[in-house]
Image: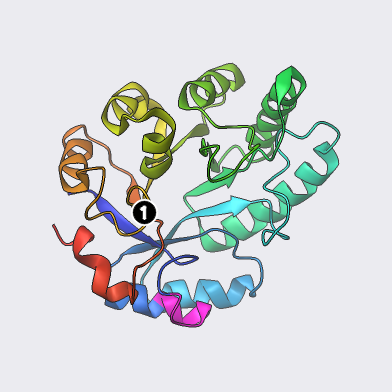
Amino acid sequence: MPKFAANLTLLFKELPFLDRFEAAATAGFAAVEVLFPYDDAASEITRRLTANNLKMVLINTPPPNWAGGDRGFGAIAGGQARFQHDFRRAVRFAQAFDATHLHIMAGKAQGQVAHQTFVENLRWAAKQAPAQSLTIEPINAQDMPGYYLNDFDQAAAIIAEVGAPNLGLQFDAYHAEKITGDLWSTWDTHKAITRHIQVGGLPDRREPIRGDVDFPAWFRKVDADGYAGWVSGEYHPTAQTEAGLIWMRG
């Protein structure tokens, strides 16, 4: 089976945020990700990571105003200054946590100008932080209407056009199934450029146990294909988080 991580933005929400690190370690996770770890001191989050022997595998950029606010600025024409400001701040946090990946969000946009803006911003970011692994993630249009990056072939083409060795694909299995209707073939097409995987059950992003996708079989496929990165549980627990972790136990 692959290596599993816990998304602490969504899992263990029955606990205060800083207490979720210990809960994840106790549940058997060796790594975590946090979507927007900007409301607490980086030093305190680092302390919790160290105390619980946890690896931070991913954070998102940009920082603030996620609740009801913008979903990134990467593809927003005229938003380059905001993008660069937020990216520099996110890199400082990623370095403090020794985060494996930094996910760059595109934002709501459309058209050729958005495409060119996104490519230029990604090239700038890749040069700005050459030692940091960067990812982009297609998000389905039902869950996030208007989000610019909403197709896996589109993401692959952008990664190829940017041509940066530190830029790769963030493969969310939930979004892959929602976008293409065929998680398995989408994985086969794009596994070579995948840096990080996230999972949530279909159709309602609950535990990846039952539903439209045989996740245990897909995990075995991912492992057999030689994927060496982390697979992060990014879903909404049906009840207490611990009660639903059968999906990661094999």
Q: Is residue 28 visible?
A: no
Residue 14: x and y, percent?
43, 80
Number of numbered discs visible in the structure rendering:
1
Pick the front one: 131 or 244:
244
**Disc 1 crowd, CA 10 A, few/some/many (<14, 14-19, 20+):** many
Residue 211: x and y, percent?
25, 49
* Magenta stretch: includes residue 125: no
Above or below — where is 10 with respect to 240? Answer: above
Look at 55% across and 43% down and name the residue there. Answer: 132
* Magenta stretch: includes residue 16: yes
> SS at mark 1?
strand
Residue 104: x and y, percent?
61, 42
Look at 69% across and 57% down and name the residue there. Answer: 63
Look at 73% across and 60% down and name the residue there. Answer: 65
Q: Label 1, on which residue?
A: 232
Residue 66: x and y, percent?
67, 58
Pick the front one: 54 or 106:
106
Pick the front one: 12 or 37:
12
Look at 51% across and 57% down and name the residue there. Answer: 98
Q: In the rendered view, does 67 fall on the left or right side of 53?
A: right
Amino acid, disc 1: Ser
Above or below — where is 164 with respect to 131? Answer: above
Give the quarter of the image for residue 45: bottom right
Find the magenta span and give its range: 13-21
